[in-house]
Image: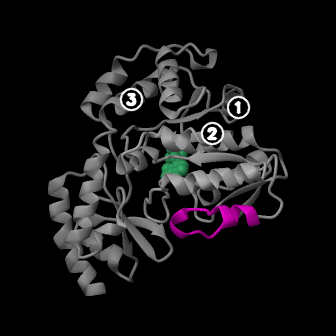
Amino acid sequence: MIELHSDTVTRPTAGMLAAMAAAEVGDEQDREDPTTNELQRRMAELLGHEAALFLPTATMANQVALRALSRPGCKVVAEERTHVLIYEWGGPAIHSGLVMHGLVAEAGRLTPEQIEAVDELGPGGVVVLENTHRSSGGHVWPLDDFGAAVAATRERGAAVHLDGARLFNAAVAAGEPVSAWSSLTDTVTICFSKGLGCPFGAVLAGPAETIEHAWEGKFLLGGALRQSGIAAAAMLYALDHHVERLAEDHARAKRLTEGIGLDPATVETNFVSIRDDPGVREGLAERGVRVGGLRPGWLRAVTHLDIDDDDIDAAIPAMQEVLSVHA
Ligand SMILES: *Cc1c(COP(=O)(O)O)cnc(C)c1O
């Protein structure tokens, strides 16, 4: 089976497993895991923030960020199909007592006008910006537009959180450092179990004081580990070996798009959007290609570390066949 349904399916490489096996470790709950501390130091620097915190998942990173930035009863505002609003089991409402307010936006990009027009948004509220935006098909948020959304949020007195689960994809695609986006926002989440190819792991970065609050939230949710350096070693390995190569995933996604007769200009990172016509998903599965759901009416084919050129060469004819039958 050619697994194009998600970039979460990657297995740790031999090099990553060796780094994990060799990790120097300590008790993370006492903040004595040296590899975790090194990851946090390096990520704070890369993301342009004072401090950073390791978390087992990006879901937990988003949740502890919201808890640290907000007050119960206030709003979390985000594009209606962002991860934080629809894939985290109501976490903002449950963990932080927030009112969840979704807005419809082209390519997942909230505009300053939309943020200006939200009612009941102010201090204690948070606007979440997602880059790349998953549900629109991995689109990159251009820096100028992104900066304008951040400025409009600050104008309202609310905080800004960047869900940058795939921010490295955005950075590689745009030829900018991750900090170009992340240094503008109060906090930022990075996920290491997507394109970066780790079994799990995430980082939250922000001001030192906010990250102290986030540490409490991490404990509260049961996310303070012991020898977390095993995971942090995989994450450090990914920073050194799996960032630049994201360009290969993007090139393969473009080649796949062209190969099946769609417009490659629609593909900015590692997601290919395909219409979810009846029978398409099943037809592809019968021919050995597994695709995933993107949003209602749309499927996605996602390239990643475990997809090579041969997989793309094999997927193209299978997809051509199925898409022409079901067009
Ligand atoms: C996958 C994802 C997350 C959550 O990541 P986990 O580490 O699996 O919890 C958060 N936000 C976005 C945009 C994602 O794609």
Q: Quadrant of the C terminus?
A: bottom left
Mark in front: 2 vs 3: 2
- What's the residue at 64%, 46% (across, down)? 161
Residue indicated by mark 3: 234
Give the image location of residue 63, x and y in percent.
66, 44
Please determine whether, in this image, residue 103 is positioned above or below residue 46. below
61 displayed left or right of 169: right
Mark in front: 1 vs 3: 1
Residue indicated by mark 1: 210
What's the residue type where badge 2 is placed? Thr
Considering the numbered disc 1 on the image, is that residue within a helix, a strand or a loop? Answer: helix
Say if mark 2 contacts mark 1, CB within 8 Å. yes
Q: CA distance from mark 2 to mark 1?
A: 8 Å
Task: Look at the image and give the residue range highlighted in magenta.
Answer: 102-117
What's the residue type where badge 1 is placed? Thr
Considering the numbered disc 2 on the image, is that residue within a helix, a strand or a loop? Answer: strand
